[in-house]
Amino acid sequence: MRVEYGKGKTKGGPGISIRLTGNDVAIAIDAYLVAHGIRVNGARTIRVNGELCGRGEIYVDPSGFVNVGGETMYGRGPDASRENEVAEIIDNLRGALATPLNVVPSKVRAVLPSVRSFAENSDEILERVEIVAGIVASTKCNHEDLESEVTHLISLLTQETGLDDWGNDLSYTRN
């Protein structure tokens, strides 16, 4: 299996290509079956489109990312560092909001240093970060206020970089 930036020339970036051998494809199909409660014992032949599979490829478009061994590759390419950084911050903030209520403040608190360093030249974003920091530092953290302020912070981050609220490049549209 090989994971590399794609050869695409889209406006959004090259994307990521995951190249699989025929054996990789067969293992993936077998793992899919196991994940759905189907266990096969003994020799088997796995065919794709009626034939043995010689190779496969998974293409991840520029709006996506792949985590390989703890390192993140963004579909926008290796040179889109500012957009990649904010996309990761947005993903981490959204992930923090999706955790159980008693964990949300600590998860949000852990992301704030990244937001501060990213937005060091934006007073509006830094002001919002301090509001969020004050809420998570409170002994009686109001989760509705926290969610509202984090959502506002995400909106400011997206305006700063031209990404949408999910970290996708607004200039890239799918057909």
Image (cartoon, rainbow, N blue to C red):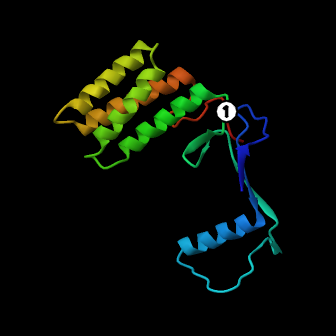
Residue 127 in picture, x, y percent from top left: 35, 17
Task: Indicate left or right for 19 with 28 as reference.
Answer: right
Q: Residue drawn at (71%, 70%), measured in percent from left and top?
A: 26
Foreground residue, 77 or 3?
3
- Quadrant of the image containing the C terminus: top right
Residue 103 in picture, x, y percent from top left: 29, 45
Task: Indicate left or right for 85 with 7 as reference.
Answer: left
Residue 22: quadrant of the picture = bottom right
Task: Indicate left or right for 58 with 160 as reference.
Answer: right
Foreground residue, 43 or 127?
43
Foreground residue, 174 or 65?
65
Element on which disc 1 rests: loop
Q: Residues within 10 Å of mark 1 (few under 14, many from 20)?
A: few
- Residue 164 in sight from this viewpoint: no
Residue farthest to the bottom, as pictured: 42
Total number of numbered discs in the rendering: 1
Q: Residue drawn at (51%, 37%), measured in percent from left and top?
A: 166
Amino acid on which disc 1 is placed: Pro
User: In the image, is residue 155 above or below residue 34?
Assistant: above
User: In the image, is residue 50 above or below residue 68?
Assistant: below
Task: Indicate left or right for 71 with 13 as reference.
Answer: left
Residue 23: quadrant of the picture = bottom right
User: In the image, is residue 114 above or below residue 25?
Assistant: above
Q: Residue drawn at (70%, 41%), measured in percent from left and top?
A: 15
- Residue 140 in sight from this viewpoint: yes
Residue 84 in picture, x, y percent from top left: 58, 32
Residue 142 in picture, x, y percent from top left: 22, 36
The residue identified by callout 1 is 78
- Quadrant of the image containing the N terminus: bottom right
Q: Residue drawn at (62%, 40%), measured in percent from left and top?
A: 73
